[in-house]
Amino acid sequence: MTASLQQSRQGKVLLLTIANAEQRNALGPEIYAEGMRALTTAKEDKDIGCVIIVGEGSMFSAGGNLQRLQANRQQPPPVQAHSIDGLHAWIEAIGSFPKPVIAAVEGAAAGAGFSLALACDFIVAASDAVFVMAYSNIALSPDGGGSWHLTRAMPRQLVSELLMCGERITAQRLNALGVVNRVTTAGSALADALELGNTLCGRAANALASVKALVHQADHNTLADHLMLERDHFVANLHNANAGIGISAFLSKQRPRYE
């Protein structure tokens, strides 16, 4: 069975399902390309307010396909570099995508699967889900932005432990560390992610896009620069029609219906 990234809709939520169950939802170039196409289309679709990435069956993703990696060892290094560039383009696209992206994790998120989950704005994980940066277990180093995201979320010593020792970490521990947003009962990650997604879809898209942009730029700005950026986003959003809708609804104790 060919690996694919299947698309479906539930209301205003776009579901992207990693469908490669025979290889534990391993990732590869075809999935990266489909992910890029899906986000490009969803960016312009006003009927889509949120994206959820989920794995087919009982697993999120085992990361890279080891058979493909072994075969690529016989190819010139640019072959693997090109493949990783595809993954990294998808990771960057998730970061710059103006709408919330949620990872719904059942089972294991390993290697690049863990990196993919970290690239999302939210992680909803089943209580028995496990996460592992498995690279060092097979003499490799991270890709997919895993080391970047973890270093910004955790103390350096813990990041070193996860990346160098390659040990599993539970959803509960990541929740306590602030990396996983919600821990759900086993089998309920997608349902809870959809609940979160529907809540987000009920908010003003322009405000959420500003929040995401501000959060992603905060690490790179001085305080003075970031304050100016916050000012500019605030003023633009105040003069957006949705602010009028939101303020009026709040004052009249009604539920807003944003454009």
Image (cartoon, rainbow, N blue to C red):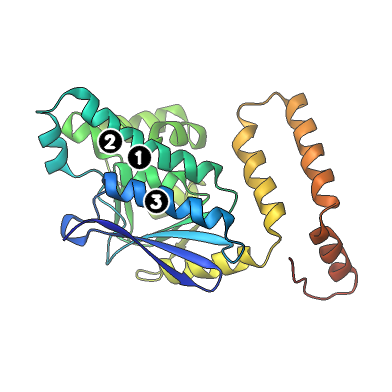
Estimate the x, y position of residue 210 in percent, counting from the top left.
69, 46
> Dot 2, crowdedness within 10 Å: few (<14), some or many (≥20)?
some
Observer-nearest of 96 and 57: 96
Observer-nearest of 119 and 124: 119
The residue under the point 28% across, 49% down is: 30
Instruction: Say whether residue 200 is left or right of residue 32.
Output: right
Would you say residue 233 is visible in this rendering? yes
The residue under the point 60% across, 49% down is: 98
> Dot 1, crowdedness within 10 Å: few (<14), some or many (≥20)?
many
Mark 3 residue type: Gly
Instruction: Say whether residue 17 is left or right of residue 218.
Output: left
The residue under the point 62% across, 67% down is: 199
Along the polypeptide, which appears first: circle 1 or circle 3? 3
Mark 2 residue type: Ser
Query: What is the CA distance from the residue labelled 1 to the residue labelled 3?
Result: 9 Å
Instruction: Say whether residue 64 is left or right of residue 54.
Output: left
Labelled pair 2, 1 in contact (Cβ < 8 Å)? yes
Element class at badge 3: helix
Residue for badge 2: 83
Quarter holding residue 144: top left
Mark 1 residue type: Leu
Element class at badge 1: helix
Tell me, for residue 35, which label it has, or none.
Answer: 3
> In this picture, is 258 found above or below 135?
below
Query: What is the CA distance from the residue labelled 2 to the residue labelled 3?
Result: 14 Å
Tell me, for residue 87, which label it has, or none.
Answer: 1
Estimate the x, y position of residue 198 in percent, counting from the top left.
58, 69
What is the quadrant of the C terminus in the image? Answer: bottom right
